[in-house]
């Protein structure tokens, strides 16, 4: 009598890191040759658990070192709890639980949420990572997604047609400490859209189709300026994590040598204790050099590999790329090529980062920033600031967008000369840059025009430093005009709408005498005059200045 296992095969599809272009893991996909075993597994938790165990064993037979993604229905977890058999299968295959991500698959309807959350907690305690699959195209309640606090969130590529939704999910993922994955990517256009929307990982036939053998190489479109998202100062180390080659702390030098010689792409091995905390870091070149020396194999082969390792360099999973560079810079200069271990809040290794990946990405970000700098003030241009405005809007932040310029600047240039005018612009730019703090940004958008993006509480120090001081060019007194629009969450949809709200405020500020400041609220009529005087009415008209929206 034939068993369901007789007609079941497994395929492997890479999960690709969109920043490094490397393979971050392999999803194991069941491929039954007869019958609908997956539909049965959806109704039968015991069968689904056995499928997960079979998937791990199939991966073990392929001798892949990459982290694994194993699919399990949400209902199975709620019904069976901690999946002891899966934990035993992972250990039996010589793998560690934190090398396995459980893709929790919908449906979630009618699944008892307390039981599901309890099971996920138990699996996390065993060391497994958790991925929420089918989000956005399934029935996962948003509250449940937040309570799950997954390590990864997987979206279907169909949502790329709604980039605002993908960007919003990226913001949520940042809050949860999760990575965003887009599944089903088939075209370069989809890959570009996924990257632009903030996804860090992706999988689909564009990179590599599911295959019986784990893919060692994948196709990734050129990660040029059109595909890479704008890297903020201090990009997260999560964007650069590669799979780590892990062995127990008790591994012999012979075991490490076998792993390295059989895996030429592995740059080093981390020896971890029973809980997954890095104990020693073994660098490929230094280790093989020691082993290949005279009597090296005889001296070390059966001895603990830890004797040929170094204390691991580690950073937290919430660190920035710049913090990784700091870790590398303060250590032994002979170890600058060592991988840096990335650890979770419990100190367990979740992967490694390579210095080359960080340097490349950070260098590209600096080149892009330099290309957008104004040559006179070396401040970023409008594209950088408007991009930040869109990001703040997506994050639901309250913010103030301000426009500043020099009054009657043409007369300044004509009277004092262009050199004095240029020096005045540079001086205003330097003052703005010195005054802003925290996440505030200053941009020079051309001529004598500046943009300032800041939290509302940062406005008063800015105003007192820029407006309440005397300015001059070539001995001629000069005044400045400032217009600010306050944007509440939901009051504007993008930077274009914010700029449209700012335009009439700019006109109002320019109509005032002396140093002026006008403040308005996005979506509301009127404005307040915080600095400046109304122009004098022509003699005999009897008109007096007014302040719309004040009081």
Image: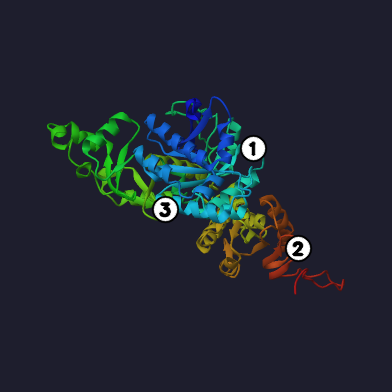
Determine crowd level at label 2: few under 14, some 14-19, many 20+ residues with C-alpha closer than 10 A.
few
Residue found 53% across the figure and 59% down from its top: 439
Residue 396, position as x, y percentages in the image: 62, 57
Q: Quadrant of residue 245?
A: top left
Residue situated in front as seen by the camera: 162 or 460: 162
User: What residue did someone put label 3 on?
Assistant: 125
User: What residue did someone put label 2 on?
Assistant: 524
3 or 2: tag closer to the N-terminus? 3
User: What residue did someone put label 1 on?
Assistant: 158
Q: Is residue 484 left or right of residue 355?
A: right
Residue 49 in view: yes
Residue 19 in view: no
2 or 1: tag closer to the N-terminus? 1
Residue 150, position as x, y percentages in the image: 51, 50
Q: Nearer the viewer, mark 2 or mark 1?
A: 1
1 or 3: tag closer to the N-terminus? 3
Residue found 42% across the figure and 29% down from its top: 216
Mark 3 secondary-structure assignment: helix
In space, the residues marked 2 and 1 are separated at their CA atoms by: 36 Å
Q: Where is 89 relative to 395, above or below? A: above
In space, the residues marked 3 and 2 are separated at their CA atoms by: 51 Å
Residue 190, position as x, y percentages in the image: 60, 34
Residue 211, position as x, y percentages in the image: 49, 26
Q: Is residue 359 left or right of residue 502?
A: left
Q: Is residue 334 left or right of residue 107?
A: left
């Amino acid at each position: 009598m034939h068993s369901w296992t007789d007609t079941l095969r497994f395929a492997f599809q890479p999960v690709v890191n969109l920043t490094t272009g490397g393979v971050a893991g392999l999803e194991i996909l069941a491929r039954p040759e007869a019958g609908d075993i997956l539909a049965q597994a959806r109704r039968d938790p015991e069968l689904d658990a056995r499928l997960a165990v079979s998937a791990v064993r199939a991966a073990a037979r392929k001798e892949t070192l990459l982290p694994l993604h194993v699919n399990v229905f949400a209902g199975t977890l709620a019904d069976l709890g901690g999946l002891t058999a899966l934990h035993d299968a992972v250990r039996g295959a010589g793998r560690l639980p934190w090398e396995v991500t459980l893709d929790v698959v919908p449906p979630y309807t009618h699944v008892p949420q307390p039981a599901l959350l309890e099971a996920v907690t138990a699996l996390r305690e065993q060391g497994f990572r958790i991925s929420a699959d089918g989000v956005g195209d399934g029935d996962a309640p948003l509250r449940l997604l937040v309570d799950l606090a997954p390590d990864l969130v997987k979206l279907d590529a169909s949502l790329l047609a709604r980039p605002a939704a993908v960007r919003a999910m990226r913001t949520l993922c940042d809050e949860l400490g999760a990575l965003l994955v887009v599944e089903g990517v088939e075209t370069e256009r989809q890959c570009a859209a996924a990257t632009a929307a903030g996804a860090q990982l992706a999988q689909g036939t564009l990179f590599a189709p599911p295959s019986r053998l784990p893919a060692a190489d994948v196709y990734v479109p050129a990660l040029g300026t059109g595909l890479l998202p704008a890297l903020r100062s201090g990009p997260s180390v999560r964007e650069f994590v590669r799979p780590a080659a892990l062995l127990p702390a008790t591994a012999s030098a012979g075991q490490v040598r076998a792993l390295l010689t059989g895996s030429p792409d592995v740059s080093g091995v981390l020896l971890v204790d029973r809980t997954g905390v890095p104990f020693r870091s073994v660098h490929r070149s230094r280790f093989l050099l020691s082993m290949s020396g005279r009597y090296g194999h005889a001296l070390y082969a059966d001895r603990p590999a830890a004797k040929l390792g170094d204390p691991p360099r580690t950073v937290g999973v919430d660190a920035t790329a710049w913090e990784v560079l700091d870790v590398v810079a303060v250590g032994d200069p002979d170890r600058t090529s060592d991988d840096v271990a990335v650890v979770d809040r419990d100190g367990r290794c979740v992967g490694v980062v390579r210095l080359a990946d960080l340097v490349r990405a950070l260098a590209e970000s600096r080149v892009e920033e330099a290309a957008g700098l104004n040559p006179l003030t070396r401040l970023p241009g409008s594209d950088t600031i408007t991009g930040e405005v869109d990001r703040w809007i997506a994050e639901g932040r309250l913010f103030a967008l301000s426009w500043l310029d020099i009054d009657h600047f043409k007369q300044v240039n004509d009277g004092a000369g262009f050199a004095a005018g240029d020096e005045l612009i540079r001086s205003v730019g330097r003052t703005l840059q010195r005054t802003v703090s925290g996440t505030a940004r200053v941009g020079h958008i051309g001529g004598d025009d500046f943009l300032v993006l800041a939290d509302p509480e940062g406005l008063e120090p800015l105003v007192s430093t820029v407006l309440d001081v005397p300015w001059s060019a070539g001995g001629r007194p000069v005044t400045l005009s400032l217009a600010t629009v306050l944007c509440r969450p939901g009051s504007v949809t993008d930077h274009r709408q914010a700029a449209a709200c700012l335009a009439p405020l700019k006109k109002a500020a320019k109509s005032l005498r002396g140093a002026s400041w006008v403040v308005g609220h996005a979506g509301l009529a009127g404005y307040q005059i915080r600095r400046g005087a109304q122009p004098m009415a022509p003699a005999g008209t009897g008109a007096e200045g007014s302040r719309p929206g004040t009081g």
